[in-house]
Image (spheres, rainbow, N blue to C red):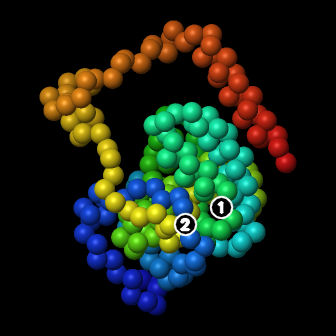
Amino acid sequence: MSTTTKDYTLTMPLEEAMRTQRALRRLKPDPVDDDLLLHLVELALKAPVGSNAQKWEFVIVKDRDKVAAIGELNRTVADVYTRLGKGRKSARRIVESVRWQMEHFGEIPVVIVACYRGVAPPLPFVAATSFFGSIYPSIQNLLLAARAAGLGAALITLPLWSPAKVRKLLGLPWDVVPCAMIPIGWPVDSYGPTKRKPVGDVVHVDTFGNQPWRVSPPPAQAPNPVRISLGAGAAVVAGGALLAWLLMRD
């Protein structure tokens, strides 16, 4: 049963929502009704979940100081991300929207933090993928519901570079893991058809590489990771040093 007091039943056809959904990071500061937010989360809970455990927790953040603090966590990594991608023409629009969001984060009316109760094990792989696989279907439901409601939204993870800081900010217990954040608001930009690869280019039948419906030339094969160059190794070391510096910041 719905806990909302207003009728926010969404009538947009599912395929229209899926075909026109995209990440909208430029958001107006106008408030979003609490009943509508609750409706979005209620629809998120309709997603399938491993073992029907239903260990979701959603923190709706509207407090201006806390939204600003999340924005500062985002800025720490987003600034590096946008600088690295600045020279790539193919990423120009994305970089611009990420930087806009970074610079206006404190104006975002609400941020929903999607969490899952339990311990996220790094190993074995099956345990890690099962843990996060139990929260992401609900996040996609939330994003589709936001699209159908005309709200702008985007899944982000950059503020989670320091889970400890996020836990402290939101008062999360040790066994509640923040998995993703979804800034939500009325959009500055508009939704519309998205550009994606032809479906035949990403479908393989029975064996990887068997693509009977492929329409584009296949991409160059990635180098064998066993033959990583010293240059790539240096990049890994530099990335590790950057992460260590981020973690040591106050």
Above or below 26: residue 78: above
The amino acid type, in three-letter code, at marker 2 is Leu
Which residue is at a point 26% across and 64% down the rendered structure image? 16
Query: Does 63 sit left or right of 197 as displayed?
Result: right
The reply, left or right, for residue 189 in relation to residue 231 is: left
Looking at this view, is 118 or 230 the one in front?
230
Whole-percent x and y of residue 51? Answer: 40, 55
Left or right of 51: which side holds 178?
right
Q: Amino acid at mark 1?
A: His
- Tell me the element at label 2: loop
Is residue 182 positioned above or below 223 on the image? below
- Residue 205 makes an appearance in the image: no
Query: Which residue in the structure is indicated by mark 1?
Result: 104
Residue at point 62% right, 34% down?
84
Q: Are marks 2 and 1 in contact (CB under 8 Å)?
A: yes
Q: Is residue 154 above or below residue 131?
A: below
Q: Quadrant of residue 196?
A: top left
- Earlier in the chain: of badge 2 and badge 1, it is 2
- Residue 247 in percent (x, y) is at 77, 41
Q: Give the alpha-carbon distance from disc 2 to disc 1, as whole Å.
A: 9 Å
Q: Is residue 39 visible?
A: yes
Q: x and y percent of residue 31 in the render?
A: 58, 79
Q: Position of residue 80 (x, y in %)?
A: 67, 39
Along the viewing direction, whichever of 189 and 178 lies nearer the viewer: 189
Pick the quarter of the image with the N terminus: bottom left
Q: Residue furthest left?
A: 212
Query: Which residue is identified by label 2?
Result: 27
Residue lying at the far bottom of the rendered structure = 5
Q: Classify 10 Å Cα crowding around label 1: few (below 14), some (14-19), many (20 and above).
A: some
